[in-house]
Amino acid sequence: MECTFDERKKELEAECVVKPSFFESCLDRLKVFMKPFVQSMNRFDQRDHAETFVSGLCSDLESKNAESIAYHFDLDRKTMQYFIGQSQWADLPLRKQLVT
């Protein structure tokens, strides 16, 4: 018996799940990659939040937004929301680093 589109879609989606442990082995390499970008940020808290945010993106969180990432790392949500939405930093050094 043939399955419906929705049934087959669910089967395929289940096969496409990447386990969080896959990303755990990459976090150290990712931090090395991010180092020149993060160093261009002036303040220590910005550098720290950048690493935290990217680690959250690589986590097993279902919803990957500033609030859920903050809670995942036991931070106040406003701290991460401010970093993403309002924190001032120069993007030119980051863009220069990307093209080199």
Image (cartoon, rainbow, N blue to C red):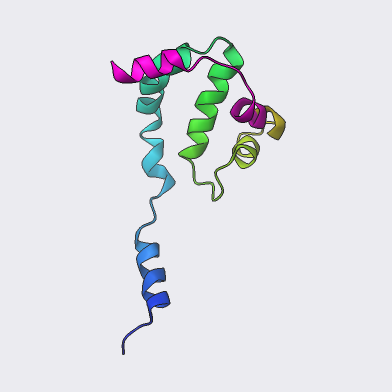
Q: Position of residue 53 (x, y in %)?
A: 53, 31
Q: Nearer the viewer, residue 88 or 79?
A: 88
Q: Residue at x 62, y 42 (%)?
A: 68
Q: Residue at x 54, y 46 (%)?
A: 61
Task: Name the dominant secondary structure of the magenta segment.
Answer: helix
In the rendered image, the vertical position of residue 56 relative to residue 20, given as above or below: above
In the rendered image, the vertical position of residue 51 relative to residue 77, given as above or below: above
Q: Nearer the viewer, residue 81 or 44?
A: 81
In the rendered image, the vertical position of residue 19 relative to residue 90, given as above or below: below
Magenta-drawn segment: 80-100
- Is-magenta flag for residue 86? yes
Asked which quadrant contains residue 100, the reply is top left
Q: Residue at x 38, y 51 (%)?
A: 18
Quarter of the picture holding the N terminus: bottom left
Q: Is 93 situated left or right of 52 in this image?
A: left
Q: Is 48 situated left or right of 18 in this image?
A: right
Q: Residue at x 46, y 12 (%)?
A: 39
Q: Position of residue 93 (x, y in %)?
A: 42, 12
Residue at the extreme bottom: 1
In the rendered image, the vertical position of residue 41 relative to residue 12, given as above or below: above
Q: Position of residue 12 (x, y in %)?
A: 35, 66
- Is-magenta flag for residue 23? no
Q: Is 72 situated left or right of 97 in this image?
A: right
